[in-house]
Amino acid sequence: MSTPRRFFIDCLAADCREVWLEGEEFVHARNVLRVEEGAEIVLLDGSGKEYSAIVARIEKKRLLAHITGVNAGEREPRAEIYLLCGALKGDKTELVVQKATELGASKIGVFNSEYCSAYMNENKLERLNKVAREAAKQCLRSRAPSVEYFDDFTTAMKSAEGFDCKLFACEFLGRSDGDMAQISGSAALVVGSEGGFTEGELGIAQSLGFAGISLGKRILRAETAAIAMCALAAFALGELK
């Protein structure tokens, strides 16, 4: 038996028994997935709950679903992982957002830096959040991580305040100040864009509590480094066991 299709909706009231699915999620349900009346689906409101439902009626621009049950999602990460990644060229940022979501990132920040040559606008940011939602549905998460953009590097680093472990991957660092294998609690991870970081940016990050780390002898592509850091952090925090 196939897994019921999953769709994001607005936050539901506790006593809600039926809901309309509209907009892009309806278009995807009707035109792409060919959902029909009587089909079982799962509705996600971003709270961590999963609402079992039956499609009761399909109209031209929306469908009505009757809620049959509610459960807490079982696949959300216990540890909080915050990925901060420099904006990347082309669709590479989308790849990073997709894979970070699959690996359990709870929050994703995309930032501008001195050597960054990619640009961001509202449409691109909305696209990144859509990628996160689609990835969350694919890997059966109950929440999609929010994606935020920071035009200022220092503001981006300050957004990680309060995290237990803060690691800053830097390609010119001779020796790591932190140990990825020893992290615990919540973790904020920073990876640069294709151009990397300046000495000044490393200094700003260190002044805000980040430990500089090396990712080995080989120079990794920015998207590879971001995905690898998420995977290593998820493993160290017990999310891949």
Image: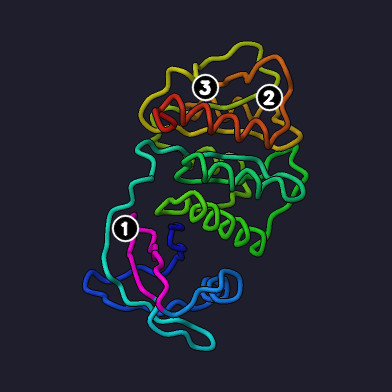
Residue 195 locus on image (x, y percent): 76, 34
In the displayed structure, 81 sits above or below 218; it is below
Tell me the quadrant of the picture where the N terminus can be found.
bottom left
The numbered dot on residue 105 is none
Query: Which residue is disc 1 drawn over?
Result: 49
Image point 49% across, 49% down: which residue? Answer: 139
The stretch drawn in magenta includes residue 49: yes
Mark 3, residue position: 211
Q: Is residue 232 above or below residue 60?
A: above
Question: 236 above or below 125?
Answer: above
As helix, strand or loop, the secondary structure at mark 1 comes to: strand
Q: Nearer the viewer, mark 3 or mark 2?
A: 3
* Sequence-wise first label, 1 or 2: 1
First in sequence: mark 1 vs mark 3: 1
Q: Residue at x 34, y 38 (%)?
A: 78
The residue most toward the bottom is 60
Which residue shows up at 75% across the image and 36% down it?
194
- What stretch of residues is rendered in magenta? 38-54
Mark 2 — residue?
Answer: 199
Q: Nearer the viewer, residue 65 or 225?
A: 65
Q: Residues within 10 Å of mark 2 (few under 14, many from 20)?
A: few
Mark 1: give few (<14), some (14-19) or many (20+) Cα within 10 Å.
Answer: many
Residue drawn where x is 52% and y is 22% of the image? 211
Asked if marks 3 and 2 touch (Cβ < 8 Å), the reply is no
**Viewer-side residue, 142 vs 217:** 142
Amino acid type of disc 2?
Glu
Q: Secondary structure at mark 2?
A: helix
Residue 218 vs 110, above or below: the answer is above
- Of marks 1 and 3, the one in the foreground: 1
- The x and y percentages for residue 170 are 65, 24
